[in-house]
Image: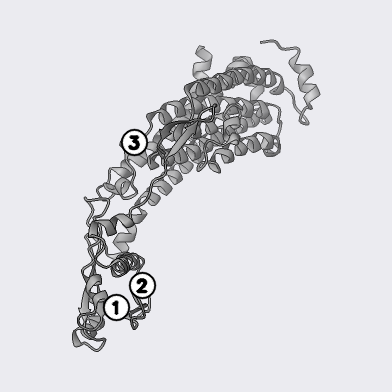
Amino acid sequence: MNKMGTIIGFTFKNKVRTKSFTITTLILVLLISIGMNIPYMIKVFQGDDGAAKTTQIGVVAEQGNRVAGLLTAFTPPAPANADKAADKVLLTPYASADDAALKKGLDDGTIEGYLTFAAQAGDGVPPVTYHSKDGELNGDVQTYLQNALQQVNTQLIVGDKLTQEQVAAMFAPVSIGTQQITTDGTAGADMPEKPKPIINYVIVYALLFLFFMSIMMTGNMISAEVTSEKSSRIMEILITSASPLTQMFGKVIGIFLVGLLQIAIITASVAVNLMLPHNASILSDFNLDLGQLNVGILAYGLILYILGYFLYALMYAAVGSIVSRTEDLGQALMPVLMLGLVSFYIPMFSISAPDTMLIKVASYIPFTSPLSMLLRIGVGEVAFWEIAVSLVILLVTTFVMGWLAAKIYRTGVLMYGKRPSIKEIRKAMKAYKI
């Protein structure tokens, strides 16, 4: 254990001090910081100080025009985020397009444009035309005008038959519930649809990327270091100081700590960016509420990451031990890399449908279960026994892989020349018992 502790400490310090680790971590932190501060940087370059803006639009119609009267009297619904000042659209009536005040406002930019109406040909709002210098209509302003005109159109058609509350109710979204049918064909209890909070999707999406990148990067570190020591003949000296088994697990655990450190740095950078004053409302702007976060995602996610890391790290170590030249390492690692990509892409492309049969099956296959089960726990429907079964299968497979990797590593580190065949490895493994 003393020798393994020395190997773990040496591997950790050696990898943390490398330029590749430093540069990769800094690039990831920089990209995260830029991504989280893009909205603020856009506001700075556009001169947006965060205060509510008022866009003035003219409404050209004859005096007494009912459409113009209802449109200028339109009151938009209150914003979902009451703490954030909402941009306003001010509709001002004008008798004609030649009105002096309208022309002056268009010239000095205080009025963005004006609306005109075609001749009334029936019930409802007649065709509307927006006039401006650039001929374009801002997206937010267009949405506001469309909502206002839709409500005016409804009022014109129904007349005084409906109250304002009834008109507003016409535009309210309709929810759809679900009902389970029992085995005898009778309807069971109503089960209202409960969509998962958006924050859970965001966390799962981020963890899938983070865990995949961490496992693949650290796995490549392990295989590259083993192959480098073997090709430079340093392995022959190391064998005399510590057993191959101690070396392998020492390297795997040491680089595991490197991966945890990198995840901790990335998590800290996200937390620091969220605490910046101009990012105080970034979560509410995207309707993200940390109070709705399923804590089980983080707890089970850590367990799945640890087991998934050791499963793949042991495979990388075993493959690295049978390669004599670093030039051949990429080709030898291709099957492991493809397996890792499959385990990543299955949940990534199924994040909107986490309860499909593909995800359920993948959550029990040990090589794909770390990320697939994470998806089901975060945004799907999964029973505790399913999680337990998946973890037990993954744990048993990891132990079996540890035993197999130890035998391959023990025989592979001292086999030089061309890459040994499976038959040669099996023959050499029989001479070594754990």
At label 3, the amino acid type is Gln
Q: Secondary structure at mark 1?
A: strand
> Can you identify the residue that label 2 sits on?
137
Instruction: Describe the element under mark 2 as helix, strand or loop.
Output: loop
| 141 is higher (above) or lower (below) than 406 | below
In primary-sequence order, the first of circles 2 and 1 is 1
Question: Observer-nearest residue: 134 or 433?
Answer: 134
Q: Nearer the viewer, residue 191 or 211?
A: 191
Callout 3: 10 Å neighbours few (<14), some, many (20+)? Answer: few
Tell which of 318 and 93 is nearer to you.
93
Q: Badge 3 is on which residue?
A: 292
Are the two marked residues, 2 and 1, in contact with CB atoms closer than 8 angstroms? yes
- Which amino acid type is shown beneath numbered disc 2? Leu
Crowding around mark 1 (Cα neighbors within 10 Å: few <14, some 14 to 19, many 20+) is many
Instruction: Find residue 44 and report its horizontal and vertical position in percent.
Output: 29, 61
Q: Earlier in the sequence, mark 3 or mark 1?
A: 1
- In 3D space, how far apart are the residues under numbered discs 2 and 1 (Cα atoms)? 9 Å
Q: Nearer the viewer, residue 243 or 245?
A: 245
Q: Given contact means CB atoms under 8 Å apart, are the residues at marks 3 and 1 in contact?
A: no
x 45%, y 38%: residue:
178
Q: Which mark is residue 113?
A: 1
